[in-house]
Amino acid sequence: MHSFPLENFRYDGDALPTGWMAYQNDVGTDVTWGLSPQASNATPGREYPAIADDQAAYLNRGNVESGNPEDWLVTKKFTVPANAELRFWTRLVQATENGSIFDVRISNANVNPDGSNLAAYTSLIDSDGWTETELAGVGAQQLLYKEKVLSLSGFAGQEVYIAFWMKAPTTNSDRWLIDDVRALSKCLPVLNPTATAPTLTTANLSWNPNGSTQWEIEIIEQAAAPVGSGVLYSGPLPYQPVLEPGKCYKYYVRAVCGPDNPSAWSNPVSFVQ
Ligand SMILES: [Ca+2]
Ligand SMILES: [Ca+2]
Ligand SMILES: [Ca+2]
C-alpha cells in the first residue's frame, strides 16, 4: 500500500491505533498521547470535538514543577507515495498563548526500524517548529480545527515514520488535538477555469481537469467571500449550474481525488448572468 489512508482515531476505547506509538521524555510522565474520550464517556467540560466523529488523538496539558515535558505521537510505518502530502487537522484547547512548541518530524525506517529512535527524526517544518500562534492562530482561533498540509515529495518511495511532537512549558501547556491524518499523492489542481456563454439562468463553467474526474464547485455572488465548500460534480464538462438572472457571480473549483484528498482551490472566475 503506497499511501497512508485516513486515520480518524475513532475506536471503542482510548488506546492508540495499531502500529501507532507514544513516546515521552522523563518530565511529566503522567501525561502522554492517547485518544480523546468518546463524547458519551467524556468528563463534562472535556468533550473535545473531533473531525466527522467524536474522537481525535489527544495530548492532555502538562503542568510540572521543573523542566519541559516532551511528548511524541508516532504514526505506523508507511511507504511515502510519489508527490505526497501529509495532511491533518489540528486544534488547541486554551485560547491564550501558553508557550507550547510543536513540530512534525520524519524518520527513515532503514535507520530507525521500529520508530523509537527519537534522535533520528528531522523536522518537516523548520529548526524551531511552530509556536501556538504559528500552529493555530491567535486567541479563539486556536480553538478551531485547521487543516495542515506538509510536503513529503522529498521522501517518495521511502519507508518512514512521522512524529507529532510537543514541548510543553513547565506550567500549564495547552492541550493538543490531531485528527484525520493521511499521506496521499498530492491532488493536482485543475487548470484554466473559465465561464463562457452566459444565459439568463446558466453559463458554461469548464476547466482543464489535469487528470481529475471529480470536482467541487463553489458559486457565489461576486461580493461574497468563499466558504470553502460547494457542489460535488463528476459529469461531463462544461458544468451548467442553475443561476438567478441578472446577478454577478464568481466560482471556485477544486479537483477531488478522493473523499479526503482535494486539490487546492482555483482562483475565482467572475461572470454575469
Ligand atoms: Ca476523528
Ligand atoms: Ca509526557
Ligand atoms: Ca493556547
Image: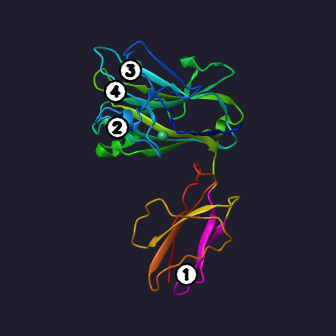
- Mark linked to residue 47: 2
**Which residue, given by chain and number where applicable, does mark 4 sit on?**
61
Question: Residue 150 lies in what quarter of the image?
Answer: top right
Taking the spot 47% from the left edge, 29% from the top edge, the residue there is 13
Q: How far apart are marks 2 and 4 (CA)?
A: 15 Å
Label 2, secondary structure: give it. loop
Q: Could you tell me if the residues under marks 4 and 3 are in contact, i.e. CB atoms within 8 Å?
A: yes
The kind of residue tagged 4 is Arg
Q: Could you tell me if the residues under marks 2 and 3 are in contact, i.e. CB atoms within 8 Å?
A: no
Question: Position of 269 compared to 54: left or right?
Answer: right
Question: Which quadrant contains ligand 2?
Answer: top left
**Which residue, given by chain and number where applicable, does mark 3 sit on?**
31
Label 4 or label 3, whichever comes before in sequence order: 3
The kind of residue tagged 1 is Thr
Nearest to the eye among marks 2 and 3: give it.
2
Establish whether ligand 2 lies closer than 8 Å to the Cβ of label 3.
yes
Label 2 or label 1, whichever comes before in sequence order: 2
23 up-or-down from 92: above or below: above
217 up-or-down from 89: above or below: below
**Which residue, given by chain and number where applicable, does mark 1 sit on?**
202
